Amino acid sequence: MDELLFVDSTFEKDNTSRYKLSIQLCLDGFSFSILSSNNKCLVLYQSKRLNSDTDNTSIDILKDSIRNCDYLNLSYDQISVIWLTNKTGLIPSDLFSEALAIDSLQLCHPILKNETVLWDEICEMNVFLVYALPSALPEFIKTHFAGAELSHQSYSFYKRVLKRDIDIKHPKLFVQVYDQFFDAFIPDIEQKHFANNFTFKDETDMVYFILNIYKQQKLNTEYSHLHISGKIDETSKAFQILKRYVKEIHIEKMPNEIPLKKNIPGSEYNQFTKLLNTSLCE
């Protein structure tokens, strides 16, 4: 069932035009946060898991679920829509063209007939982030969320990391975890960034890929810190294994003022950190 995880006592449902809405969409469902004008979290909401036999049916179910959610039919001062997918790639800005974007993505991922290709420019990296999503989605977002900005989930992740100081001697590894894959990013002062995503079957699988990044990128597990955000917490199996090998691990958590329901794992709440940070990257 749908879960309203948190509502602040100061939230005014009849006066939302001064608030910011950040919503993450995928074919399995959606989640969103509502922030005040000074970025205080007011609402956290996670939809039920949407299941269907085909992607075409899934997008119809997703659109109907959004239309039927009261919070998503209110007016907001600012709306950020994030599409969640691992069908993505990076193209240097100097080489970018629409044709190259489509061809390059098709080399790495199967692009379905009912999908279209979009891109976000990340000036700090001198690249375009290219990704695929259902063709029906951009027009639906345009009509349902007037004035909304649509982007890929890695866009705000990369931009947020690049706002931090870069450790030249001991580069830091940043990981953002989702249900079945994670984004990984190692910023570099000379623009030789490491950026990729990895699909995993279980938490042990995820640990293997993270430790392999340390090995392949020649990072020292004693000094190169691991910063993890998203669907993970200290009780998870992945964290318990990782702390045996990596000395410094930092998990991004929800603000302390948000009360957590005892029957819901901390990892479910921590996945909202990317939504709370979206407006800070603009």
Image: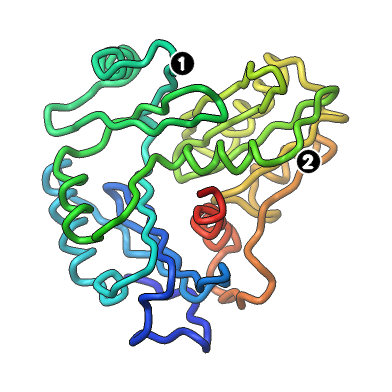
State whether residue 221 is above or below residue 258. above
The x, y position of residue 158, in whole percent, is 56, 36
Q: Residue at x 72, y 22 (%)?
A: 189
Asked if residue 260 is positioned above or below residue 92 in the image, the reply reads below
Q: How much space separates mark 1 and mark 2, taking CA atoms? A: 35 Å
Say few, some or many: other residues with alpha carbon within 10 Å of mark 2 (under 14 / 14 to 19 / 20 or more): some
Provide residue 176's location: percent of width, then percent of height: 56, 41
- Tell me the mark number nearer the camera, choosing from 1 and 2: 1
Q: Secondary structure at mark 2?
A: helix
Question: Can you tell which quarter of the image residue 102 is in?
Answer: top left
Q: Which residue is mark 2?
A: 243
Q: Quadrant of residue 212?
A: top right
- Residue 152 located left or right of residue 278: left
What amino acid type should be assigned to the residue bearing mark 2? Lys
Give the quadrant of the N terminus: bottom left
The mark found on residue 174 in the picture is none
How many numbered callouts? 2
Q: Residue at x 61, y 37 (%)?
A: 175
Q: Nearer the viewer, residue 106 or 5?
A: 106
| Residue at the (44%, 18%) spot, across then down | 93
In percent of the image, x 31 and y 58: which residue is there?
49
Q: Is residue 30 above or below residue 155?
A: below
Q: Are marks 1 and 2 in contact (CB under 8 Å)?
A: no
Across and down, in percent, residue 61 comes to 16, 56
Which is more toward the observer, 226 or 212?
226
**SS under mark 1:** strand
**Lower sequence index among marks 1 and 2:** 1
Q: Identify whether 37 is placed above or below 280.
A: below
Tell me the number on the disc at residue 92: 1
